[in-house]
């Protein structure tokens, strides 16, 4: 969706604000909510609380100094009990961040076996970025295996991220916004 703002008589510039929807998915406890909160507010908390259904966050971005974007980030719960509702949250998605926990190898296996196929079943072809999260912890998966997962799910990019120290958080969300913007333009 595009919002158009037309200035006053003294300022006749037209500013377009593109609204895009991005989902962030992955197993429970991989750090999806922490990544979103770090991106939106700059804060990180050690306090873990499981998401219920979905949480939606909005942040305005300026991409390439001429594109204004309002990014709606849908943080979708990873618990299995939400499986019957999840597809409803996928609708209208322009991009996806799929998150694995570097300290838990099985979360990457689940990306290939469940998360990517589930999303692709309900979404049109959307750009995907794979986030190998918790880079501040000891890794339980090799770099090569992370790259293999990225290829298997057709991820456009792979970022090693940490919501705790902020590594690649801004960059990840800005890149998925750029890819998603190409869909709505």
Image: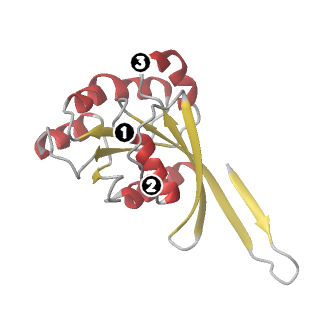
Choose top left, top right, bottom left or bottom right for residue 111. top left
The residue that disc 1 covers is: 98
Position above or below: 1 against 115:
below
Q: Is residue 4 left or right of residue 21?
A: right
What is the secondary structure assignment of the residue under circle 1? strand
CA gap, disc 1 to disc 2?
Answer: 16 Å
What is the secondary structure assignment of the residue under circle 2? helix
Choose top left, top right, bottom left or bottom right for residue 147. top left
Position above or below: 80 against 147:
above
CA gap, disc 3 to disc 1?
Answer: 16 Å
Question: In the image shown, does 17 or 97 lie closer to the viewer?
Answer: 97
> Which quadrant of the rendered structure holds the C terminus?
bottom right
Chain-order first, disc 3 or disc 2: 2
Q: Is residue 147 left or right of residue 67?
A: left
Q: Residue at x 29, y 46 (%)?
A: 133
Task: Residue 163: tell me if it is visible.
Answer: yes
Residue count near mark 1 (Cα–Cα under 10 Å), binned few <14, some 14–19, many ≥20: many
Q: Residue at x 44, y 52 (%)?
A: 176
Q: Residue furthest front?
A: 47
- Where residue 125 sits: x, y (%)? 45, 36
The residue that disc 2 covers is: 38
Q: Residue at x 48, y 50 (%)?
A: 37
Chain-order first, disc 1 or disc 2: 2
Disc 1 to disc 2: CB gap under 8 Å: no
Task: Residue 178: tell me if it is visible.
Answer: no
Residue count near mark 2 (Cα–Cα under 10 Å), binned few <14, some 14–19, many ≥20: many
The residue that disc 3 covers is: 80
């Amino acid at each position: 969706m595009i919002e158009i703002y037309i200035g006053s008589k003294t300022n006749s510039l037209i500013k377009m604000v593109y609204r895009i929807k991005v989902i962030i998915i992955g197993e429970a406890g991989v750090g999806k909510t922490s990544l979103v909160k770090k991106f939106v507010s700059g804060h990180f908390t050690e306090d873990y609380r499981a998401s219920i259904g979905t949480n939606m966050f909005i942040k305005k971005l300026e991409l390439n100094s001429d594109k204004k974007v309002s990014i709606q980030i849908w943080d979708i719960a990873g618990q299995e009990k939400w499986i019957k509702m999840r597809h409803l949250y996928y609708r209208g998605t322009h991009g996806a961040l799929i998150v694995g926990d570097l300290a838990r190898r099985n979360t990457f296996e689940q990306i290939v076996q469940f998360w990517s196929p589930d999303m692709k079943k309900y979404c049109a072809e959307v750009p995907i970025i794979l986030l190998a999260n918790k880079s501040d912890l000891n890794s339980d998966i090799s770099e090569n295996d992370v790259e293999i997962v990225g290829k298997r799910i057709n991820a456009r990019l792979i970022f090693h991220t940490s919501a705790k120290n902020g590594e690649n958080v801004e960059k990840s969300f800005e890149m998925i916004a750029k890819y998603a913007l190409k869909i709505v333009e």
